Amino acid sequence: MSTQVLAPERAESTSGESGRFGPYGGRYVAETLIAPLEELWEAYLRFRDDPSFRAELERDLADYVGRPSPLYHAERLSRENGGAQILLKREDLNHTGAHKINNTVGQALLAKRMGKRRIIAETGAGQHGVATATVAARLGLRCVVYMGALDVERQKPNVYRMRLLGAEVVPVESGSKTLKDALNEALRDWVSNVSDTFYLIGTVAGPHPYPTIVRDFNAVIGREARAQMLARFQRLPDAVVACVGGGSNAIGIFHAFLADEGVALYGAEAAGEGLSTGRHAASLVAGRPGVLHGAMSYLLCDEDGQVKETHSISAGLDYPGVGPEHAWLKDSGRAQYLGVSDEEALEAFHRLARTEGILAALESSHAVALALRLARELPRDAMILVNLSGRGDKDVNTIARLEGLVL
Amino acid sequence: MKGDQRIDRRFAELAAAGRKALIPFVTAGDPDPEQVVPLLHALVGAGADLIELGVPFSDPMADGPVIQRSSERALARGVNLAQVLEWVRVFREGDQETPIVLMGYLNPVECFGAARFARACASAGVDGVLLVDCPLEESAPYRSALDAVGVHQILLAAPTTRGARREALARAARGFLYYVAFAGVTGADRLDPVALAEELADWRRLLAVPLAVGFGIKTAGDAAAVAAHADAVVVGSALVETLSRADEPVAAAAAFLRPLRAALDARSDAAAGLPA
Ligand SMILES: Cc1ncc(COP(=O)(O)O)c(C=O)c1O
């Protein structure tokens, strides 16, 4: 595949080099964190262009993550659904079962080269926590993962997985005891241990430079998919679809297509029990600009500016904020964001399982659901590329419970 | 301008008297939304020179557990920014001298609207605003709105602030500069007044405004030790914790603050050669 591991530069408005995506992004953090963020950015700029860093990253992505991930034409699913052809970018086949590892491998190499011996991370469903514990184990770095106390209860297998990998999992009891509170606690840890600790954020949210770094490490998804489309079909897709929690898998697949004007970009946000119920996590669809976790972006908060508790069937989408680059892609009209309900996502999960023999993550099932919806409006020779960001093994218990079974 | 900005006037008076400023922090609406104004008056009565009034936020990422929980309690009782401003307005009816600095996070201000917020601060009698997650680089829109109405945006400096950034912060500081005593969250047990001395001396050489120090100052001894190298000390978590356990918060606030006041005054009296 391509030898260019990191994202090519784009127009300034979306490059993130300045820390801004239009009016979004920035560094809304306590003064103590300005210096470590600056240190991280300088290190990243240095290593990004360093041939030995790039070679090491490329080797890890191939031999450890298992890249390139396949592009799979879901012919039965497409035929049964009617309309456009659906192509799946199989990030579920990566080591640890999701796109998250693209970012953790990259950031962990950065941590190692910066001489940091301790890695901290936040996690919601536990996928990013597992991906972080995995790379920390491999590099012999200490690893502490913050996880909302409610999520620790909901995601026990992943908690155990992290512990098996040698990580310390710290349940967070403050606030709503979910992902946003885990992020707060990770920031508190970082502010208290800036000299020896690397904060490995799991999505394209947070203060500059995280939205840019995490995007660049995930941009390999879109670069591969674009090349695979051209090699196999001699054409680009008509649309690209991905689910959006914080936005890392979506930006990862979108980025290579930003300059391709004929390719429509769609983000599927978690509409939970329905946008009108208030029980959802659709920040771009139903939120407003605000500041959380170090960045200006769309946010679900009440009129007093207090951040709302969110709901989604998939823990990985259950976050009130979203990466600032998506806010800008929305405002600029380059991408469109639509809500997908719990019910629609579940239905898509089952359809993919039965027609293609693939158990998708509930997060990714939101993208599949949106793709099925869009495909029905398009002719049979149209092509929709979907980022199948993760596999559904972790969700089997949740789905069984919804159907009244206890495994 | 100095004459009518309460923060500037208060620090000028203190400097003339050779005294150090004592700045208590309380979360607005905790422990009791009914007693906010009496609590503020009691703090002044017990020796507060300025007051930092915390605006509760759902995600206080720079705060330790004591202020996190305090913030959660206040929010659970329905406290919002408009209510906090109203308490300041009522406080001002009884006290036109003691500066009030609102301390909080950006999003509630952002949602209120920066310009509207600045006007509301000025008309309620707020003198300074400290936004924890709004460092110098992001401060321009808020600062210009606040400047326009004579309210100071108070900036933070930290042990990790180095090089040219120090000069930039020192130049931009208005009212006073708030130095965070250690890299950490509020209320942590990491204060080391001896190690701070040199750092604070460097800052005072750079600054044209007074230097306040906060984070981890809990006892009269801490306050006196830090005040030796600063113009003001801020006491937050220890006070908030005391109030949260008190049957009578207003009385408890005064009882908590008096020994700190005494320790600061003993120090400046000693420095001035007066008998203790
Ligand atoms: C499989 C999978 N997809 C998507 C997400 C959502 O994150 P993001 O929007 O950053 O891709 C998660 C988060 O845990 C995930 O595990």
Image (cartoon, coloured by chain):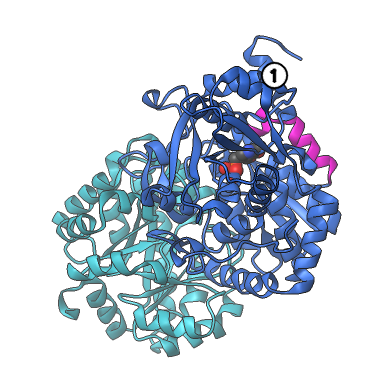
Q: Is residue B183 visible?
A: yes
Residue A158 lies, with reference to residue A260, above or below; the image says above
Give the letter of the chain under mark 1.
A
Residue A188 rendering spot, x and y as whole percentages = 58, 55
Q: Is the N terminus of chain A in the top left, top right, bottom left or bottom right quadrant?
A: bottom right
The residue type indicated by label 1 comes to Thr
Residue B170 lies, with reference to residue A150, above or below; the image says below
Q: Name the residue rendered at 57%, 26% in the picture.
A: A313
Q: How many marks?
A: 1
From the image, give the main secondary structure of the stretch colored magenta. Answer: helix
Quarter of the image where one finds residue B272:
bottom left
Q: Name the residue rendered at 44%, 90% in the picture.
A: B205
Residue A375 in the magenta stretch? The answer is: no
User: Where does ligand 1 appear, by image quarter?
Assistant: top right
Spot the cyan chain and give its letter: B
Spot the blue chain and give its letter: A
Q: A199 or B262, which lies in front?
A: A199
Please indicate whether residue A141 sits to the left or right of residue B137 in the image. right
Q: Name the residue rendered at 66%, 47% in the picture.
A: A225
Residue under pointer 1: A355
Instruction: Judge the density around disc 1: few (<14), some (14-19), many (≥20) Cα neighbours within 10 Å.
Output: some
- For the view shown, which residue lies furthest in the top direction? A404
Q: Which residues are magenta?
A: A151-165
Q: Is the C terminus of chain A in the top left, top right, bottom left or bottom right quadrant?
A: top right
Q: A139 or A243, which lies in front?
A: A243
Residue A174 rendering spot, x and y as whole percentages = 55, 41
Q: Name the residue rendered at 60%, 30% in the picture.
A: A85
Quarter of the image where one finds residue B264:
bottom left
Residue B63 rendering spot, x and y as whole percentages = 50, 54
> SS of the residue at dot 1?
helix
